[in-house]
Image (cartoon, grey):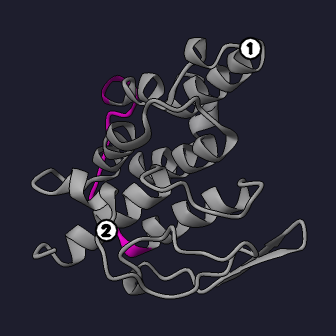
Amino acid sequence: MGSSKDDASVTNISVEEHFSVSQSSPGGQFVGPTEEISTAAEALIGRSTTLTEALKAAAMNVGHKPVETTDVAAIKEVETRAIGGDDIEGTGGGVTAVASKAIARNKTIGKESEKTNLRDVIAEIDVKVTRDREVTSEDAEAVVQAELNHSPFKNIIPGGVAESVAAAYKLNHDPSL
C-alpha cells in the first residue's frame, strides 16, 4: 500500500507486523516491527475492541491535547467505518463534525488550556455513533493512512486515534497480547 502527499511517501502500512504504528522515519516509511505493546493497547486490555472503543482509548491516552486535523481525519475514517460507510457529512452531527468545529474554535483561542481537547470531542461518541463493530485489519490500515496523510510530519501520534485503532485490531487478532 502506498500513498503520496507533499512528496512524502507512505509504504508498508501493515498492522499485522507492528505492535505499535508510531515507529516511523521522518519520510513516513515504517522502519520495522516493535517489541512492545503500545500504551493504546494497554488501555484496551480487558475492554471491547470495537471502533468506538478504540476512540475511547485514544481519549484516555492523549485526550488532554487540543484536537488537530490529523485527529479529524482519523476520527472521520473511524466514524465512517463504524456506521457502515454512510455519508457522515450529510448527518451534520457526527463526531467528525464536532471535531471539525473544535478545530475552528481552537484557532481563535490563544491559551492552550482553553482549547477543546480530544477527550471533549470523543465524549460525544456514544451519542453520536449508534452503530459499531469490531476493528479489522482494513480499518486499522485505513485509519493509520488517514492520520499519516494529514500529519505535517508524516507520523502517527503515540497513543492517538490511529495507534489506538491499530492496537484494537491487534487485540482482536491475538487476544493473548
Where residue 113 sits in the image (x, y, percent)? 56, 16
Where residue 49 sits in the image (x, y, percent)? 23, 56
Please tell me whether residue 157 is drawn above or below residue 154 in the rendered image. above
Do residues under tags 1 and 2 come within 8 Å of each other at their CB atoms?
no
Where residue 7 sits in the image (x, y, percent)? 90, 73
Q: Nearer the viewer, residue 59 or 142?
A: 59
Question: Which residue is pictured at 56% across the width and 19% down the height?
Answer: 116
Q: State the mark number for residue 169.
A: 2
- Counting labels gives 2
- Where is the C terminus found, in terms of image quarters? bottom left
Q: State the mark number for residue 110.
A: 1
- Where is the N terminus found, in terms of image quarters? bottom right
Please tell me whether residue 100 is drawn above or below residue 146 in the rendered image. above
Please tell me whether residue 72 is drawn above or below residue 93 in the rendered image. below
Q: State the mark number for residue 70.
A: none
Question: Which residue is pictured at 44% across the width and 22% down the height?
Answer: 120
Q: Of helix, strand and loop, which one carries label 1?
A: loop
